[in-house]
Every structure is written in structure tokens, then in C-alpha cells.
Amino acid sequence: MARFLNVVPVDEAVAAAVGLARPVGTETVPLEEASGRVLGADARAETDLPGFRRSTVDGYAVRAAETVGASEALPSLFRLKGRVAMGAGASFALAPGECAYVPTGGEVPEGADAVAMVEHAEAEGEEVLIGKPVANGENLVLPDEDFAAGEVAVPAGRRLSPQEVGALAAIGRAGVEVRRRPVVGVVSTGNEVVPVDAVPGRSEVRDVNSYLCRAFCSERGCETRFYGIVRDEPGALRAVLERAAGECDAVLVSGGSSKDERDLGAQTIAELGEVLVHGIALAPGKPTIIGRVGEIPAIGLPGHPASAFVVLLVVAGPTLAALSGDRTDRSRRVRARLAENVPSARGREDYVRVTVRDGMARPVFAKSGLLNSLVRADGLLRVPAGREGFETGDEVEVLLW
Amino acid sequence: MARFLNVVPVDEAVAAAVGLARPVGTETVPLEEASGRVLGADARAETDLPGFRRSTVDGYAVRAAETVGASEALPSLFRLKGRVAMGAGASFALAPGECAYVPTGGEVPEGADAVAMVEHAEAEGEEVLIGKPVANGENLVLPDEDFAAGEVAVPAGRRLSPQEVGALAAIGRAGVEVRRRPVVGVVSTGNEVVPVDAVPGRSEVRDVNSYLCRAFCSERGCETRFYGIVRDEPGALRAVLERAAGECDAVLVSGGSSKDERDLGAQTIAELGEVLVHGIALAPGKPTIIGRVGEIPAIGLPGHPASAFVVLLVVAGPTLAALSGDRTDRSRRVRARLAENVPSARGREDYVRVTVRDGMARPVFAKSGLLNSLVRADGLLRVPAGREGFETGDEVEVLLW
């Protein structure tokens, strides 16, 4: 094994990890549980929607041509033919000179081609005066204007937002085919790592990374299976990864911040499958391993939580999305101006923790081992590999958490 | 009841709704289930963290002063005193002229004040040559540098992100006090509304809003209880709202897009509690009711799904956050340039659906009854009440979904 990592560019590393991820299968869930799940197949409208001409206001259905020139001083006069009830349909048609009251959402009767708002009308018994002209089609929705029969209402691969769930309700999907939640195995390694409820002895640290990984996976719609804290012994890690390969859709191995630990991780992954990447031109996050154990992707994360988190965002995020069949762009990017210089070494992508306030990005300079900076920062500023940093006042793009 | 709504400004309406919301109580959950929950009390570090001087690199612990002037041509010479093992602590101190190998994350021995990276060192038996000077404190973390004893690691009111869960792990919180999930009752009303698995007859529509409301609440960490589709009859709605007042922390009543329906909703809420707002200077979303039934907030949403969604975002969102004790700023605002003029009436806040691509915001002009525009748009452009719209090229702020 090489003493120094043979680093590859970030794009290449991400492509390698994503290339190992096979989308999980689908299952059908009730629509009321579909929020946040990934749609498994295009959802098409079976019929035109709303399916009838629907008023968008409370008002009077009229022929638009008969309101031309109407004003408050000289309103157009109509005879009230009837009132349309909600959900009951319009049981009559309008002849010239006639109008009908239609509530918001009600059906616009035959013969009418527009609805005059009630605010511009005065009714007196059978007579209705319209004080403002309406255009043909005004204040109504056509039968296929929301969704036409056969139209894709929500495309496959969307992580369903509330409004997409609403669209599925509109087209009548009481059950929805969604991707099942991928199961991600999480392994912590390191002789110095103790459980979260233990008091760390001198030179020991609590197991932060497994919680970071589990919370990250959960936020991205995955289930997780925790395989415990594994000591730095070849047999122990091997046994755990073999189990994970049989039980999970991917596995995240955290720890291995020192070279000896990393080498052990890479060697074990190589024995059970293959190592594609060992070292990424990424700071923090350089000592990352990408490979597979059996048929599932395995990502070896650095031991420092702040480094591990950058690798979760940059590498594991796209990998979990590929596993989940998720084609939603969930990146939260904002543009901001830099309040301070950000130096960087050319040849690697630097991710600098920043706060963003009032359009100004301010670096949170912190050592990669520290968690507090992750909590204090609002997101990451990416410095591309081809740049030697940014200067005060530069417009930059920040990836918000 | 007044024929036309007596509208109030958006800020006033939101303040009224938020003022009715009392934060729910707390419960303790295991840390691995705390992601996305709202922290109930400040979480403070009990001890300094990491608690010992920790190396952030693989390298050699040295006295920085002894590397002054070191170069590849003229390196500083050290005697290797020993190697620090992970988790085992440094069992020895360094005298002048001595160094120790420390892996990333290992303890830096007494006597050293910096770590020289292994990449800048050459070891030959007991002799180590350092080819680059290090500064005092370089490549190590101080005992209280992540969190000091007594410091707030994560403040109360945060909706826990993965990195905050990581911080809680670091300070040893195996169980976390979080707000319980508020229970939100959801009621659909309207004689024209049929269940999602029914084929709507002429002039009927499927129950979109209850799914929209439930998915929205679920996305914001609330549980929901669905009370079904209630016909426009005073007794029916009253019975359901009475039950909801006893079983929920808030209730959303959707439907009532026409004036008659709205009046019925407002009247029923008034009978069971109080109506504070009936009509907001908001488009779409004007016919909104804010009140209480018993002691819980009740929000009456417009019947058009696209209007209902704007009211969910603008009014229900802050109300649910207040109920949840959530003080996280979850707004996703981006700045963009307008690709087209956006007209608006002065005196009301207009929310215009827009797409955002490459920094350009483009309005999705659509009637308020249509769901498809909600699915196609990326977010909402807010036109303040004091403006008559925006012009092409104006820089605007977009509230992303």
C-alpha cells in the first residue's frame, strides 16, 4: 500500500461512488405517507382536470362580449337565470342577456365564457348589473387546464414535496409507487472511540461519526443499521463488513483518521470487494476511501467529524441519491460576497465553513477536527481546484446545510 | 357578517396566528432518533472537549522553537522518543531535542507544543529529520478547543441537523430532551369535494387540500390527524372542530373557497372560540381565517390548492414553528434577477410563483386554482404591499420551496 495517498479529483471520486450505487426497488404506500419519499414511476393524469369549466372567483357567469364598454356609470344589464351550487353542477345553459351566480370552484354553465367578480356586480332581484368588462376566459379554468389526460403530473425520481403530494391527490393516486428507503450500514472504527454514554478516558473520544452518519442518512430518507464501534483489528472489521454487505444497500465506515487505520480499512474493503479511490483532492476530506464490499458501495470517511461531514455532503450525498433513485436537485446554493480573503492550495477543492448574514459570507476558520465550527457555520464555500482561493469582495457560491 | 372581507396586513395576520400557538411539551428520545427534532433545552458540554491535546495530522510532536529555520536542505534533527498509540494516551514527556510519532487524533505528549506533518519528515531508526518549521500550536487541538466545560454546544429551539446531532454525541448526550411533535388536525370541507380514490362527478373535485396540509405538517415535523371531508352544514363542522380542539394542538380547515362556505367556517370557529382575522391582504390567499377553537389555533385555508399552499407557507409555517418551539430559521431565500415584469396591486402582498434558473427568476403565470403551477415553480416571489410590482432586471428575493 502506498505511503502517500494517490489522490483523484472530486468529480472523479463522486462518479466512482455513484457508479457503484444501484437504485433500490419500489413499494406502494398510501398517499398520506408519501411526503418525502421518492416517486418510483411517472404519475400521469388519467383524465382532464378539473374536468369541467371551473370558476376561480365568486361571481356571475356571462358572455364576455356582452360586457364590452361596461362601467360603474353605465353597467351592462343581465337577467339572473339561476345559481350554481357547489358540487351540484350547472343544470342549465345561458341564453344571450342571461347570467348565473357561480361560487368559487363552481361549474360555469354552457353559454357563458367568463365570470364577472361579485365585487363588480350589483344584484337586484332578477336583475344583475355588471360594472366592469370581462375578457373571454377571464376568472375561469378550462377542463384540462390543470392537468390534461395523459400528462405527467409528477415525474419519476422526485422526492415528493407537499405540493407534489397535492398533485398526486388531484390525479387520484390513493396509493403511490415509491422507492423503498435504502438501508445504509454504519460502522465506527478506532481504538480511541468510546460509546456516547461513556466518559472518555485520557486520549479517548466519543463516537461522534456514527451519529453524524445516521442523522445524515435519515435526513436523506434512508434507514440505517448501526454495526457498533469496531476496534482496529483486521478480523473484526472484516466480519462486520461481510454482514453489512448481506444486509444493506451501502455501508459507511467512519474513523480511520490515521494512516494505519486507513490502510486497515482499505485493505479490508479490497479483500471483500474492490477499492476504487483511496484519497480525494479535497480539503478537508482527503483520506477518503471509495470501493465496494460484495455488491454494495462502501465509503470510508475520515475520522475527524468536520472532515467526515464534508465527505458526507460531497460524496455520500450523491451516492445516497443514486441509491434512492432521487433525481431532485436538493442543493441549497446561495450567492454571497466574501467578507475576508480565503486562501487555498491550487490542485484540490477546498470546502471552507462560512456563515452567511445579509449576503456576506464570512469564513469560520477552524481546525478540521472541530465540531463546533460545523454547528456555528451556515454552510460550505467551495473553492474549485483550479483557484488559489478567493479575495474579499468576490462573489461566491455557498452550499447551505 | 360583512359581505366583503375586512383584510389585515400579512404581518398582523401572522402575529395573530403565532400569538395563539403555545409551544408543546418535551420528551426524551435516544440520540439516534433526534435528527430533525427540536431541542428542548440548551445542551451544554459538561467537560472540556476533546479534553486532551489532540494531533490533527499524522506526524511528529516537537518543540516548535527547535524547528526554526529548518529546510529540506538543512533539516532539524530530533531523537525519536516513542510512538503514541490511538486511544492509549501519551505515557511519556519530551525533553529538548526529542520528538514522538503521533497519529491523527492521538495525544500530543507533554513537552511538545506542535506537530510536524509526516510529509515534511524523514525517519531513519531513532533519528527524525524535520524539513519545515512549525509554529507553536500548529496541527494540534487544545483540550477545550472544541467545547469548553459549561459552553452551550447546541441551543434550545434548534431543529437538529446532522452536525448538531454530532455535537450532542460529542458532549455525551445519549438521550436528548426534545419537543414532542405537535398534533395538527386537518379538516376538509366542501360539498364538491370527494375522496382521492373516488372518480369525481361533474363539478366535483378530489380532496387535494387535506393531503397538501398533511404533507406540509409532516415536512415540518408535526403529526396529523385527519377528520375527513365535512359537508357544508353547520352541525357537521362544529362537531369535528370540537373533537379536534380536544385532541390536537392546532387545526387546519381547508376548503371554503366560496363566500358562503367561508362564512360558515368563520361562524363555526367564532362559536367555539374566537375569530381574530377574516381576510388577509395577500394574493393568492386573501380569504383566510385565523382564530381559535377552544384553546388551540385554527386556520381556515382557501379552497384553491395553490392559494391554500401560499397560506400554509406564509401563515401556517410560522404557527407550526411556534407550536414546535422551533427557533431555527428555515427560510430558503435566494436572490435572483427578474426575467419578466411582475405587476402587482399596491396594498397587498403578492406571492408570484417563479422558476429560478442560473440566477434568473421567471414568473409562472397561472390561475390560483391550478396545482400544476405549484409543481412547475421553484418557489415564490414576494411583492411587498408597498410596491406596484417589479420590473425586468430587478434583483428580487425568492422563497424556495
Image: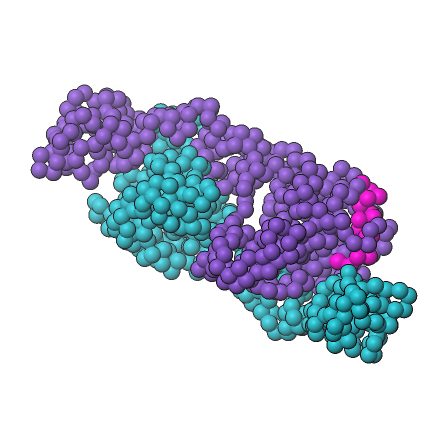
Chain colours: A cyan, B purple
Task: Find residue B177 and report its horizontal and vertical position in percent.
Answer: 57, 32
Q: Nearer the viewer, residue B118 or A240?
A: B118
Residue shown at the point (49%, 54%) measured from the top left = B395
Task: Find residue A110 and report its horizontal and vertical position in percent.
Answer: 78, 76
- Residue B262 falls within the magenta-colored stretch: yes
Residue shown at the point (35%, 40%) measured from the top left = A340
**A196 versus B338 height, above or below:** above
Residue shown at the point (30%, 40%) measured from the top left = A261
Q: Quadrant of residue A283?
A: top left
Q: Quadrant of residue B178?
A: top right
Instruction: Specify start and end residues of the magenta stretch as a single range.
Output: B257-273
Task: Find residue B277 and report its horizontal and vertical position in percent.
Answer: 74, 45
Q: Nearer the viewer, residue A377 or A35?
A: A377
**A156 versus B281 height, above or below:** below
Q: Is residue B312 visible?
A: yes
- Residue A397 falls within the magenta-colored stretch: no
